[in-house]
Image (spheres, rainbow, N blue to C red):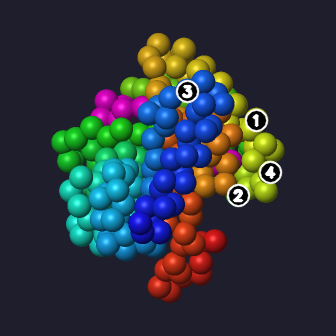
Amino acid sequence: MSVLAENLSALNERIERACARSGRTPGDVRILAVSKNHPAETVAEAVGLGLTLFGENRIQEAKAKIPLCPGRARWHFIGHLQSNKARDAVSLFDMVQGVDSLELAAELEKQAGKQARTVPILLEVNVAGESSKFGWNPEALLAALEPLNALRKLEIHGLMTVAPYATDPEKVRAVFRKLREVRDRCADRLGAPLPVLSMGMSGDLEVAIEEGSTMVRVGTALFGARPRAAGRESAG
């Protein structure tokens, strides 16, 4: 068994245990494999093991990598997207996670119209109010829902957040719980379900699942330490 296969098996066990503790079924939680800085060959191996969702956060890397990967792979843009990269994001990705402003949403709408497609999105919420992170304040998001929902080429599938780093995952449980509560308020206001909660990463995914995550974004726990990208400092 390869190292990746062993890591995936261990990850699935973690998800199963978290689901068991919270009365959920493992099939309710999808793995988004964070493949940034990993080569197409690694993605192909992951696809062979049954993974289908992959996340990238750099347009240039995605443009080079995605055409080399198996066609069964589905791609999400994760992280902050600059408006001037919206055209490429619409053409490359099946979903854009991290839509964090009306300006970006409007540009995605414009580019989606030009490319005659509809783009599923997640709205990023800065639950903890960290100045170093992008995303809506919860109340600001509620106020922005009406104009966001009026964009006909964008489909709001749910919310996402990046929790503050903590050595003890219990310290960020309240962040995940708050995102679920904000999601429920948004769904009530829209009168439509928002089924996707993208929250939880390698170090805190159990707590996120216990609080309702339907998608965990996992890099290190699957692929190991991320290789240093050429010409860049390590992302950590």
- Return the disc, 1 or 3, that comes first in the chain's sequence: 3
Question: Which residue corresponds to mark 1?
Answer: 174
User: Is residue 164 magenta-colored?
Assistant: no
Residue type at numbered disc 1: Ala
Question: Which residue corresponds to mark 3?
Answer: 24
Give the foreground label among 4 and 2.
4
Q: Secondary structure at mark 4?
A: loop
Label 1 – label 3 distance at C-alpha: 19 Å
Residue type at numbered disc 2: Ser
Foreground residue, 154 or 179?
Answer: 179
Position in image of residue 189 (x %, y %): 54, 16
User: Is residue 160 magenta-colored?
Assistant: yes
Disc 2 crowd rating (10 Å Cα; few below 14, some 14-19, many 20+) is few
Q: Secondary structure at mark 2?
A: loop
Q: Quadrant of the N terminus?
A: bottom left
Instruction: Tell me what residue is drawn at x 54 percent, y 54 percent.
Output: 10
Q: Secondary structure at mark 1?
A: helix
Label 3 – label 4 distance at C-alpha: 23 Å
Instruction: Tell me what residue is drawn at x 46 percent, y 27 percent.
Output: 195
Report the span colored magenta.
151-163
